[in-house]
Amino acid sequence: MNKHIALLPGDGIGPEVTQQAVKVLDTIALRFGHQFTYTSADVGAIAIERHGDPLPDATLETCLAADAILFGAIGHPRYDNDPTAKIRPEQGLLRLRKSLGLFANIRPVSVYPTLAHLSPLKTEKVTGVDFVIFRELTGGIYFGERQRTASDAFDVCSYSAPEIERIARQAFHYARNRRGKLTLVDKANVLDTSRLWRSVVTEMAASEFPDVRFDWMYVDNAAMQIIQFPADFDVILTENMFGDILSDEASVLPGSLGLLPSASTGEHTALFEPIHGSYPQAAGQDIANPVAAILSAAMLLDHFSFHTEADTVRQAVRSVLEAGIGTPDLKAEKTVGCKEMGQKVADLLAPGNALT
Ligand code: IPM
Ligand code: MG
């Protein structure tokens, strides 16, 4: 099948990890007889440098015309150290999410048994960890009315029932196809938006998804439970800001930030990106871990309903890790660079190669 993919490599290590994900996609295309074509576009700090805009119109058009978007990373220390900067790389990503209506951010968190010793938690705590965070991505405090004067500021958090229902429905379906459990994370003891989430989702659980075990947790408690009993979670559903914080907390469980992928889906073209940032100190040094980007490409394949292809990629990644091969962050038996890591995965995927 023919598919057209927009590549938005962005900043820092974004370009080099995206390149390895493309290498893997090209090998999958060969193995399964697909044809993938690509158009690259600028986003983030590089786009500010080149076009004065973190999300140039041409980039948005490229995204709208594509079947999927493979995103690298954005961010540059120049902007982090300057809170007064009017134009920031992050605005590019936020505008992209809003323009494409990407309301569901899906972040699977699992721990490779061979890498469990790298986790900041004890191995027995992270054994069997396999959950997915559904984070609402286009509403809440991120996109509310805001204002700042020299001495005052506010950011409004608002949600409507339809905004909650559309992501909740996706999350319930997802839970139904997994271990059948959904946990809503909110702060309904304090916030009215959370009370709305609680009532909408509780009602849906009873009327549409009686087969899914539904519970809820206050966000402060959830922050503790993710550390104490991470293996107990299946699907976590939450609003934008809580999801941002909890997904970063959860992302350290596997022992390296370089391992986890994400998908953002919604009204227009879906976007796939590693959860790690632009890691500017490592840029261009061939030490970045491409696994998160490669697994994001696997989620992209799933989105095309190429499930066998996606599973094959995940299998190849697992085999490479189990063979003790890894980038420096994985402290592997055999340390390789970003390019070689991508190549090892691609080699396993070469046509005719039987994967075990
Ligand atoms: C993320 C990031 C973004 C967010 C930033 C870069 C705007 O932290 O994707 O989680 O806060 O959503
Ligand atoms: Mg974040």
Image (spheres, rainbow, N blue to C red):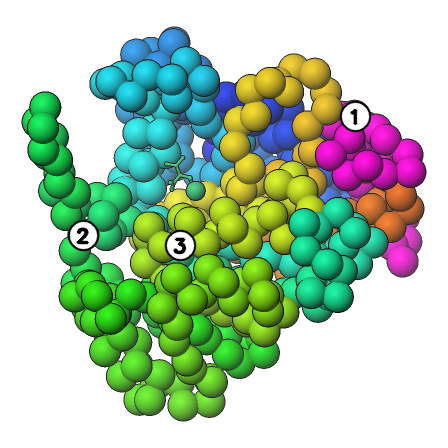
Q: Could you tell me which residue is drawn at 32 percent across and 37 percent down? A: 94
Q: How many dots with numbers? A: 3
Mark 2 and mark 1 lie on one chain; the one further toward the N terminus is 2
Question: Which residue does the numbered mark 3 point to in the structure image?
Answer: 243
Q: Residues within 10 Å of mark 1 (few under 14, many from 20)?
A: some
Three-letter amino acid code of the residue under disc 3: Gly
- Which of disc 2 and disc 3 is earlier in sequence? 2
- Disc 2 versus disc 1: nearer the observer: 2
Q: Are marks 2 and 1 in contact (CB under 8 Å)?
A: no
Task: Tell me: 36 left or right of 60.
Answer: right
Q: Which mark is residue 157?
A: 2
On the image, the x and y values in percent for residue 80 come to 39, 21
Q: CA distance from mark 3 to mark 2?
A: 14 Å
Quadrant of residue 91 within the rendered picture = top left
Please, what is the three-letter code of the amino acid marked with disc 1?
Gly
Q: Nearer the viewer, residue 338 or 303?
A: 338
Determine the CA span between mark 2 and mark 1: 43 Å
Asked if residue 141 is among those painted magenta in the image, a careful observer would answer: no
Ligand 1 is found in which quarter of the picture?
Answer: top left
Q: Residue at x 76, y 60 (%)?
A: 123
Picture layout, residue 336 above or below residue 346: above
Give above or below for 47 relative to 338: above
Give the magenta-colored segment's residue range.
327-356
Q: Position of residue 111 (x, y in %)?
A: 70, 57
- For the C terminus, give its image quadrant: bottom right
> Gap between marks 3 and 1, in whole Å?
32 Å
Along the line of sight, which residue is nearer the eye, 9 or 161? 161
Helix, strand or loop at label 3? It is: helix
The kind of secondary structure element at disc 2 is loop
Check residue 337 in the rendering and tell me which mark sits there, or answer none: 1
